[in-house]
Image: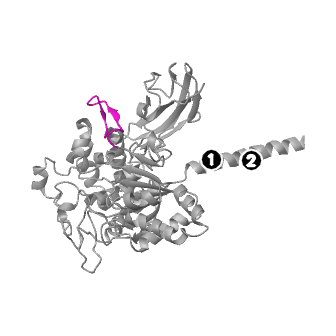
């Protein structure tokens, strides 16, 4: 009996360790490096990023250049861009360069609200730690990757370290600093016995999220010499959060980007960090950037923008897809989430792309829409941003916090045609708010072509019947969406993936 009791206790103990390890694995924050060339939309993306610093393991903040911004090499070298959007600038020694202090300046503003942010989540990193991550990368000219820099060496070290956690490299400007880090690794190991293992290590560890190819170094160097590295290449969907947002976002959702919304929820009465967010007609002027006229009220009227309307955060999708909302998009870019939805390239399974052929059905205009994989989440994303701006100044009890959402069963199900599939979820709101439940099919994320009917879709427990025409290997994605009735209303999710078997 004693031996049996000891055995049972050991089993219980090991089960506890397994459960604890599983919980810890679920809470590992995505490890990420931001590279940025710096302009108005980078500034605004950076402000939002800092409000989500509790959700990420920020490993580096690196200045880089692009076809739109470079510092010059200090030798008077004249450079003329051949990139499609920058030919108009002509010969330049430097272009719209805003320096290598603006990240630190925004971190100082973050420091002014840091103690209040800690009331809402103890995982916010200390300002001095964030400042220690700031490095200067390859900034001389567009696409310059000919020499090692503090920033490229820093990224190289992260790529080669023994930390097994994947490393997400965000490209807000040009890819050249990351390209230089990779080139340095290649130069060090290419003709050694270690090259094969080092190449595999880097390709398995790194994911590069590119907002356009803003200097050609991805196309010319990385795609050629590192074809096995994971890449998410956003060329279309980011426009929903960039300068021409009013042409990409459905008119029914544009109020979340308009002046009254930003004035109320972000710009005013939310502390120094949010208060320095750049908006149309807010009277700001960046002296080093002659293209920055967004702060001029007359220019705002000329462009049909209300005062304090959104300008751009074109780089934010690069980290929004890392936020653990329950949508699992970081697990697979084809699942879709707050950072968009992407499909594998036909020529390279490790390259994920959007484009005109990657569409979601837009219920507002009843059409397939290449922007809707991003814009469909706009209200939830903006409400979440507003809540975090509140965290800068409000106590915990006076602010809203997202519900905690879970499934009562495994997230990946094997199902058969004709089977009735039972779904069950649960949620708890940290503020005691009432919750609204909704199960819905993310049709475009699955490989089964067709709709499924969900019974009791507005309850915690629901069900659907697998269509009899479904074939082996088809996947059906069902989203369990939970929204609280707080102010602002916040939403989180869980995703169920049903794979058809025979």
Q: Position of residue 71 (x, y in %)?
A: 28, 72
Q: Nearer the viewer, residue 455 or 144?
A: 144
Q: Is residue 97 left or right of residue 177?
A: left
Question: What number is the disc on residue 22?
Answer: 1
Q: Taking the image as drawn, is residue 220 in sight?
A: yes
Q: Secondary structure at mark 2?
A: helix
When the figure is inspected, residue 476 is found, relative to residue 195, above or below; the finding is above
> Which of the 4 image quadrants contains residue 279?
bottom left
Can you tell which of label 2 and label 1 is closer to the viewer?
1
Q: Mostly what secondary structure, the magenta segment? A: loop
Who's the residue at 26% across and 30% down the image? 365
Q: Is residue 489 left or right of residue 312?
A: right
Ranked by sequence position, the earlier of labels 2 and 1 is 2
Q: Is residue 104 above or below residue 433?
A: below
Label 1: element kind: helix
Q: Residue at x 49, y 55 (%)?
A: 229
Highlighted magenta segment, given as a residue range = 355-371
Give the residue number, with chain letter if any, for mark 2. 13
């Amino acid at each position: 009996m004693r031996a049996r009791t000891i055995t049972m206790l050991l089993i219980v103990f090991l089960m506890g360790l397994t459960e604890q390890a599983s919980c810890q694995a679920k809470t590992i924050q995505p490890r990420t490096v931001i590279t940025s060339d710096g302009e108005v939309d980078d500034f605004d993306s950076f402000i939002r990023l800092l409000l989500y610093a509790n959700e990420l393991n920020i490993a580096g903040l690196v200045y880089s250049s692009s076809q739109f911004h470079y510092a010059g090499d200090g030798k008077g070298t004249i450079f003329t861009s051949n990139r499609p959007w920058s030919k108009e600038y002509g010969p330049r020694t430097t272009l719209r360069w805003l320096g290598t202090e603006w990240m630190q300046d925004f971190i100082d503003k973050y420091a002014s609200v840091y103690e209040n942010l800690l009331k809402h989540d103890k995982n916010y990193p200390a300002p001095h730690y964030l400042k220690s991550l700031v490095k200067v990368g390859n900034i001389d000219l567009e696409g310059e990757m000919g020499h090692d820099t503090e920033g490229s060496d820093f990224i190289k070290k992260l790529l080669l370290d023994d930390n097994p956690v994947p490393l997400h490299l965000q490209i807000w400007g040009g890819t050249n600093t990351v390209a230089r880090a990779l080139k340095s690794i290649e130069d060090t190991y290419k003709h050694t016995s270690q090259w094969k293992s080092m190449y595999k290590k880097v390709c398995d560890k790194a994911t590069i999220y590119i907002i356009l190819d803003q200097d050609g170094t991805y196309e010319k160097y990385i795609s050629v010499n590192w074809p096995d590295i994971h890449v998410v290449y956003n060329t279309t969907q980011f426009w929903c959060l960039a300068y021409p947002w009013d042409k990409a976002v459905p008119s029914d959702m544009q109020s979340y980007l308009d002046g009254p919304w930003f004035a109320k929820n972000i710009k005013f009465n939310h502390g120094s960090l949010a208060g320095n967010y750049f908006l149309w007609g807010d009277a700001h002027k960046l002296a080093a950037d002659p293209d920055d006229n967004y702060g001029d009220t007359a220019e705002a009227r000329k462009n049909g923008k209300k005062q304090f309307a959104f300008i751009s955060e074109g780089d934010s999708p690069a980290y929004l897809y890392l936020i653990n909302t329950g949508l699992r998009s970081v697990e697979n870019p084809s699942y879709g989430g707050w950072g968009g939805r992407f499909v594998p390239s036909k020529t390279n399974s490790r390259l994920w792309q959007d484009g005109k052929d990657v569409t979601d059905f837009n219920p507002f205009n009843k059409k397939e829409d290449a922007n809707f994989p991003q814009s469909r989440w706009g209200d939830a994303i903006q409400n979440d941003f507003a809540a975090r701006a509140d965290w800068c100044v409000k106590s915990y009890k006076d602010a809203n916090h997202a519900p905690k959402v879970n499934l009562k069963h495994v997230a990946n199900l094997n199902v058969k045609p004709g089977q009735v599939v039972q779904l069950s979820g649960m949620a708890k709101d940290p503020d005691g708010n009432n919750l609204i439940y909704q199960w819905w099919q993310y049709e475009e994320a699955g490989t089964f072509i067709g709709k499924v009917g969900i019974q009791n879709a507005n309850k915690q427990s629901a069900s659907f019947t697998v269509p009899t025409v479904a074939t082996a290997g088809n996947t059906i994605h069902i989203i369990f969406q939970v929204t609280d009735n707080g102010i602002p209303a916040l939403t989180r999710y869980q995703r169920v993936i049903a794979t058809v078997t025979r």
